[in-house]
Every structure is written in structure tokens, then in C-alpha cells.
Image (cartoon, helix red, strand yellow):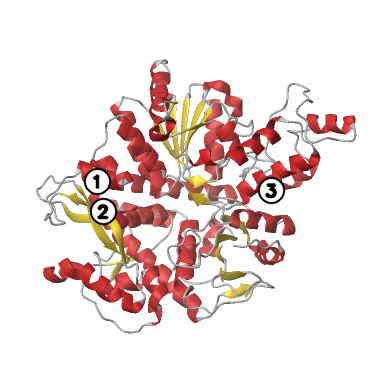
Amino acid sequence: MYVLPPQLANGARSYAELYSEILTTYRSSPLTSASSVTILVSTDVDALCAARMLSTLLHQDDIIHRIIPTPGYDELIAACGDALKNNELRTLIMLNVGGLLDLASRDWLGKAGSRLKIHVIDSIRPINLANYYEALDVFVWDDGSVEKAHEVRKSFEITFTAPEFESDSEDESDLDSENDDEVPEDDEDDENIDRDKDMTSGKRRPTIHDDKPSKRLRTSRDTSGRISREEYEDHENIIQAYYKGGTTHGQSAAAAIYILATVLERVDNDLLWSAIYDDEVSRLNPLPADAALTSLNPDDASVRASDELRFLLFRHWTLYDAMFHSSYIASKLGIWKERGRQTQQPYAHMDMDLKRVLVQKLNDIAPEYGLVELSYPSFMRCFGFRSQPLSAADAVEGISALLDAAGGVRIDVEIEGARNGGEWFGGGRAWEANANRDSGKKKQENERAEQQTPVADGGQSSAAKALHVANREELELERSSWWIRNFWTAYDALNDIGVLRDALNLSMALHRAIIRQGTSIIDKQDIKTMAGYRVVVLSQGPDLALFAHPSVLMRLALWLVDALRDHIPAVTNGSKAKRKSLPFVVACLNEVTQTYMVVGFTAAFEFGDVRKNEFTRTFVNARKLCRAELRHTSFDATVVELPQKDLRIFLDALCEGPHEDM
């Protein structure tokens, strides 16, 4: 069932009541309470911030809890298995995890019965309709959008509870009723493909490939609600359209927790910084009108409104680098083609008078170059005298970089004061979390551990390392271990400005790699047009291991979309009129696992447009045509993994399949 935020609940149960029930359940079983609350957290910035905020609230109420990083479906299956075995577990909170699954089905958590209450706080849409309307022990913390889907709810209730449609044979109707929850024999061959990748129906088999909503076994033979075949199919089509409409985002998980903290009257700047609510910034941080964006005293931890330029991390390197690595500037000016090296002075060393008027000066001349959205309202936070203020955008970049590449792959960062010199000349060093704080002995131990651990190295032959890995399970275990290390590094950085500022160097290195790869793709004309798609396949290069990470590969796809939007001529797609932008498909080879990571992105026509990413169903349709071993390794359904041998047939099937207007 769904629960609305307080401002929309109209007296009904809301976030605060659910939180109160969590506390009551915990305190009612003092002997087992230590293991009764578990939080599953996706490895994205929003979920990370929400976890930190929720953990703070639970600590204030003396609630012992466990946080489990959950980067993908493999980890979710393991967590659900543990939850079913742990009879002491009473509350399972899922942050950006599993909202698209039918969590109350017996294939997931239905076997736990009424002892386990599941709280879904998920920003990714769509949410499984069974979680919204049917599961009594699943509580979706909704933002109010579900209230607008009256037609979808009606169709779900009819198809879920009523007999399907009139049949000419009573025996046939009986058979349909008895087999509602049986798995077709044809799916046995796909068990290794689909067992853990359910998206729409919530089951491991059958999975997203089924368009019908999942059903519980009916306990009565009520035929009074029988409807015609045409009516039933109409309702099914409405539900299919709901799931096929594409992936988008609703209220962030961090915003939901902040609303809860507001109702509990516990908000402070630490929670505000993790969620950022415009009105709350001025309410909690009243400042003089002429206050500068600097710390007013050693303990100043205020959050202040500011205008942010669309220059990437411009306060932390040169303006040229900030513009060069900005997808917005690349889109408007095609700056990757420029060879000039102006504005090379680091922002921190620029004249103070220029820094004060920089935003205004740039906004004055921006319209001449088509840069009509050069700045946007944002926020900065002070950290006393420990550090210069940090913008919200920069904080997100740093945390994202830690989640993506704090470990698991080698990446070189520049040493301050040197440019592109490489380690031999002292111009760069391999990134290492907390490198500035490690003692020499600890650093040597870390280096030895790196040599003994099969970590992907973009500068070496990763294929050779596969000889030392016994099987796929060991590869998955290694992947899980560095994801977990990255998660906790990023989690700690939320409250440690030193670690967060160090992470900005890692973010810069990531964006340099994206620019290197992106410009190489454009210069070598590696973008192929296949039917209604633009396709890029990465199979070699120094940064191959880095782009085998799904989130980094998605960043590359986003950069390509922005960079080429205004610089590639329109194309004709079949009989349709010319389109300015085509969907992008980017694939990268993982030499260790011998698989391709594939991301799909629906390109918007203009910068700043918000469009649903419809590749969820597109990938599934292609898999049906070619029978490729498709795996969803993360909760983003527009990211899939498939064996190296299946890439070509998968891309061919993608082009041959139905082309919806994307």
C-alpha cells in the first residue's frame, strides 16, 4: 500500500506514523531488537544521503540498525534470503532498491508473512502496482503522484482480482484459474537468465518479459465479476502502458527522509545539506543581505543560496578545464575541437574582484554564444575555518566519484601544481582513498594489497588477470567487495569535508577520462547509425576497465548526447520526419568477465529537457528476438550485461525490433 507525505495525507496515516510504528515494533521485542531493523541502500548519491539521514534519526531514538549496501539484483537476492532466514527481523527499509519488484510475492519476501514490514522509499519510477495497491505489509512512501493514476489503479484491480475473460469452455476457464501462478515450461531454459532479474511482475520467473500483472491464487470461484475478453485486454493494455512508459524519477529518497525529520521537528543543517530544500535554506540560515560566501566564524556550518555556473567544478581547477569538461558548453560551442589554452589560471588564484563579478560578467556575454542557461540557482555550505565553502553540485560530483571509482579500478589523478606529467615526472599519482592521511607504512600495505587483489587496471591487460580467477562466482565476489568499500568510503565522506574535497580530484580524473574517450569516439567517427539508434562499441583503449562500470559508462553516454545534440545533422528514421536526436546505445567490453556492459539513453531534443528513458522495454524486446543472455546487474533497467559473443546478435535484434517513438 502507499502512504502520502503529511501535506497530502489529509489526516490519514503518513510518514511520521510509519516511523512511529517502526519504533514501536522495535521496542516491543527488547530481546531481539538488536537485529530487527535492516536498511538496504542502493549505491547512488540520493540513497546514500537518505541512509545517512535516516541513520541519524534512528540513532537519536536509540534504534540499533544494520545498513547493507545493495548495488544490484544479485545483492538484493542475497539480502532477501537473509531476511527470510532471520526470524528476528521485523522491519526492512529499502532506499532506491526494488520498487519495481512485487516484493510481497513468494519469490521475494512473501514467505516472511506478516512478521516483516517492508518500507519502500524509492525515487525511480515506475513502482510495481502490487506494492501500491495490494501488498498489505509493503509500505511505499509516495510523493502523491500515485493519486493521479486513477485509470491505472482501476485496471490493476480488475485484472488482479477478477477472472480474466469469458471463455467458450468452462474447462478452459478452470485451467486458467488453476495455473495463474504456475511457470510455463518454456521458461525453464531461461532460468539462468531471468531467475533474478524481475522488473514488472516481481517474480524471478517469469520476469519483466511478461506483460500481465502477477496474481495471487484465488481462493473462491466467484464468477460474478467476469468480464469480456475485449474489456480485459483493454485493462491489460493500460497496465502495459504504465510499465512501458519509460524510466523516470519522482521525489528523491533524501527528500522523503527530510520531510519525516521536519514532522519530527529534528531538522538541522546536516540533514538540510543532504536533502536541500529551497525554502528551508532561508528558514534555517538567516543571514544579512550583504553576507559574503565565506565562513563567518570557525564554527560556521550554514547553508546559503547561490548562483551556480554550468562549469564543472570551476572553483577547483582552471576555468578552461571547467568549461572544457562541461557537457553544456561542449553542446553549445563544440569546445572539444578547440586547441587554444586560455583561462589557465586556477580559480583559487584569480583576483578577488574578478571572482565576485564572474557570474554576472559571464551572464552578460553568454547570450551572444547561445548560452542562455549558463547559471542556475543552487546552494553552498560553509565548513568554518576548516575549508572553503563547497557547492551542492561539487559535493554531488565528489560523492558520485567515490561511489564509482574509489576502488575497483586504477585511475590517475593530477598532483596540484603539475600538469599531465605522469608519475615518472611527478605530475600524477594513482588515486587512493585517504592518501593524504595514510602513514607511509599503511600506504605500503595498501599497495601490496592492490598487487594481490584482482582489480581491473586500465593500463594493463585485464584479460591476463582472468587466468588467476577460478570462476564467475569469484569475479562477482570481488566486484561486490569493492562496491561495498566504495559505498562506505562515500558514506563517511558525507560528514568529512577533508575526504570529500580529496574526492574532487578523483571526479576531475573521471571527467578527463570521459572527455578523452568521448573526443576519441567523435574524432574517429566511431558512432554508427543503426536503424533508429546511434551505437558506440568500446572494445579497446587505456580506460576500458573504467567504462566497464555501468555508472561511468552512462556518464559517457550522457556526454555524447549533450556534445553532439547541436552538431550532428538531422537524420531520417524510416518513413518518419527528420529527427534532431536519436537514442544512444553505448557498449563497453569487460575483458575480465568477457561480457559487454550496455547502456541505453533516450536523447532529448534540447538541453535541459526531461524525457523518460524507454530502453527498459526496448532491451527486453531485443532479448526476446535473439534469446541473448541478458542480465540486469543494477536497479537501472536501462543498463544490462550480456556475453561478448551475444553483442552482435543483440544489436541486430535491437534494430529489428519494434521502434517506439523515443
The CA distance from mark 1 to mark 2 is: 8 Å
Q: Percent from the top left, x then y, of residue 489?
A: 34, 48
Label 3 belongs to which residue?
A: 209
Residue 640 vertical placement versus 556 (above, below): above
Whole-number angstrom distance, CA of label 3 to CA of label 2: 43 Å
Residue at 48%, 74% in the rendered image: 564
The residue lying at 37 percent from left, 57 percent from top is 401
Which residue was labeled with disc 1?
Answer: 281
Question: Which secondary structure lies at badge 1?
Answer: helix
124 horizontally vs 201: left or right: left
Quick one: label 1, few (<14), some, or many (20+) residues within 10 Å?
some
From the viewer's perspective, is residue 582 above or below residue 206?
below
* Image marks 1 and 2: residues in contact by CB distance under 8 Å: yes
Kind of residue indicated by mark 2: Phe
Q: Nearer the viewer, residue 568 or 610?
A: 610
Residue 499 relative to residue 16: left or right: left
Residue 59 lies, with reference to residue 514, above or below; the image says: above
